[in-house]
Image (tube, rainbow, N blue to C red):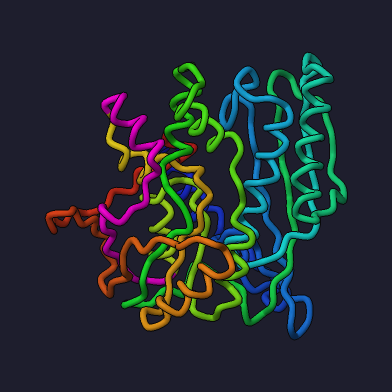
């Protein structure tokens, strides 16, 4: 058997066993957006790590150094947002080939410093080393959250409403535009930037966590069709997702129409949207909508409901049901 036969998540499940050797020192480890570590009776420490590898996550000729610096931090901040936390410190390790232009590296750290300054995150350490051919970036971010506000993937219950904070599929379309080297104008430029310059939903995460009405949450990094199963598996339940309720941007719909693509495919399988996917107590949806609209200035999108069966069904506008396939991004199967 080869690694590609079990995929990324099969591999994580394989290596994730027997990792906790001191249960008193951790609440949640492998299996959520961030590790959750107790600090005192009221506060928790959050720790998340993400890697970006040249020619896997980005192509040097298709991104500026500043954009790469922004994205390297943003994807980690998104994990903190998914736990309902506040980011505090970043640690940046970089493997750099000798042929990288210094202007690119200056831009890279400028992008890092700008997004960290905006979210009041300290750049507190890291490492640099040489690399043979490709840039390798590993960022760790720590954050904090109140013990009674932390949101895990494991809290969804039958009857809960499933919702997302933003449009889905834009980033996946943006990646296709980059790979196909399409002209950057109008909708194409917008979609490209949605892939290159993701915005972490930190404020949204705090509003949702502090409400007390949200039962589970994660950020959409690998696509809705993949990430919804992470909540379902951790919560031991199923779901019904309504196609017509999945939020699609005007830009994505227009681009897809011109290219003969189905925008729903991008929304389900594209990945790297970094919207928050969460579940809400059914009787608290209207109250949460009011709070969210007041604090964020826009609505979130209801897209489905948690079911007792452990199946995940996709419901068409005509009411036809089909099994939702897990087809989002998987590093080792692609």
Q: Percent position (x, y) of residue 181?
A: 49, 16
Residue 235 location (% of width, % of height): 42, 71
Is residue 159 depicted above or below 64 in this figure? below
| Residue 257 magenta-highlighted | yes
Q: Mark yes or no: residue 143 visible.
A: yes
Name the residue located 48 percent from the left edge and 30 percent from the top edge. 175
Relative to 254, 80 lies left or right: right
Q: Residue furthest right?
A: 124
Q: Residue at x 41, y 76 (%)?
A: 285
Q: Nearer the viewer, residue 263 or 50?
A: 263
Is 293 in front, or is 324?
A: 293
**Quarter of the rendering occupied by the N terminus:** top left
Dividing the picture into quadrants, the one containing residue 55 is: top right
Can residue 178 be found in the magenta stretch? no
- Quarter-wise, where is residue 208 in the image? bottom right
Nearer the observer, 61 or 18: 61
How many discs appear? 0
Residue at (54% x, 61% y) in the render = 31
Q: Which residues are magenta?
A: 235-260
Horizontal arrangement in the rendering, residue 178 relative to residue 54 (left or right): left
Q: Position of residue 99 (x, y in %)?
A: 78, 14
Q: Quadrant of the C terminus?
A: top left
Residue at 42% from the left image edge and 81% from the top image edge: 284
Q: Residue furthest bottom?
A: 41
Locate residue 110 relative to residue 17 in the image: left or right: right
Report x, y in % for residue 131.
Answer: 76, 24
């Amino acid at each position: 058997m080869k690694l590609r036969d079990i995929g990324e998540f099969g591999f994580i499940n394989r290596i994730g066993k027997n990792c906790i050797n001191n249960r008193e020192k951790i609440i949640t480890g492998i299996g959520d957006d961030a590790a959750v570590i107790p600090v005192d009776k009221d506060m928790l420490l959050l720790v998340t790590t993400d890697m970006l590898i040249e020619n896997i996550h980005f192509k040097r000729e298709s991104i500026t150094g500043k954009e790469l610096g922004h994205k390297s931090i943003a994807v980690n901040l998104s994990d903190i947002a998914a736990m309902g936390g506040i980011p505090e410190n970043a640690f940046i390790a970089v493997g750099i080939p000798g042929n990288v232009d210094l202007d690119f590296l200056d831009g890279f750290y400028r992008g890092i410093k700008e997004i960290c300054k905006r979210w009041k995150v300290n750049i507190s350490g890291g490492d640099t080393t040489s690399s043979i051919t490709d840039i390798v970036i590993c960022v760790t971010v720590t954050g904090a959250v109140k013990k009674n506000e932390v949101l895990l993937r494991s809290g969804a219950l039958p009857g809960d409403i499933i919702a997302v904070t933003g449009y889905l599929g834009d980033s996946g379309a943006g990646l296709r535009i980059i790979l196909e080297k399409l002209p950057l104008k109008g909708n194409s430029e917008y979609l490209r930037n949605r892939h290159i310059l993701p915005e972490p939903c930190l404020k949204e995460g705090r509003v949702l966590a502090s409400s007390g009405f949200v039962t589970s949450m994660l950020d959409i990094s690998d696509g809705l069709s993949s990430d919804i199963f992470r909540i379902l598996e951790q919560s031991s339940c199923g779901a019904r997702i309504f196609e017509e309720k999945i939020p699609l941007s005007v830009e994505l719909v227009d681009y897809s129409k011109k290219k003969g693509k189905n925008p729903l495919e991008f929304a389900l399988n594209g990945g790297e949207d970094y919207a928050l996917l969460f579940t809400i107590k059914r009787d608290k949806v209207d109250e949460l909508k009011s709070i969210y609209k007041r604090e964020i200035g826009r609505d979130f999108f209801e897209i489905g409901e948690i079911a007792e069966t452990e199946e995940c069904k996709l419901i068409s506008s005509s009411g036809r049901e089909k099994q939702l396939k897990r087809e989002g991004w998987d590093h080792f199967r692609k």
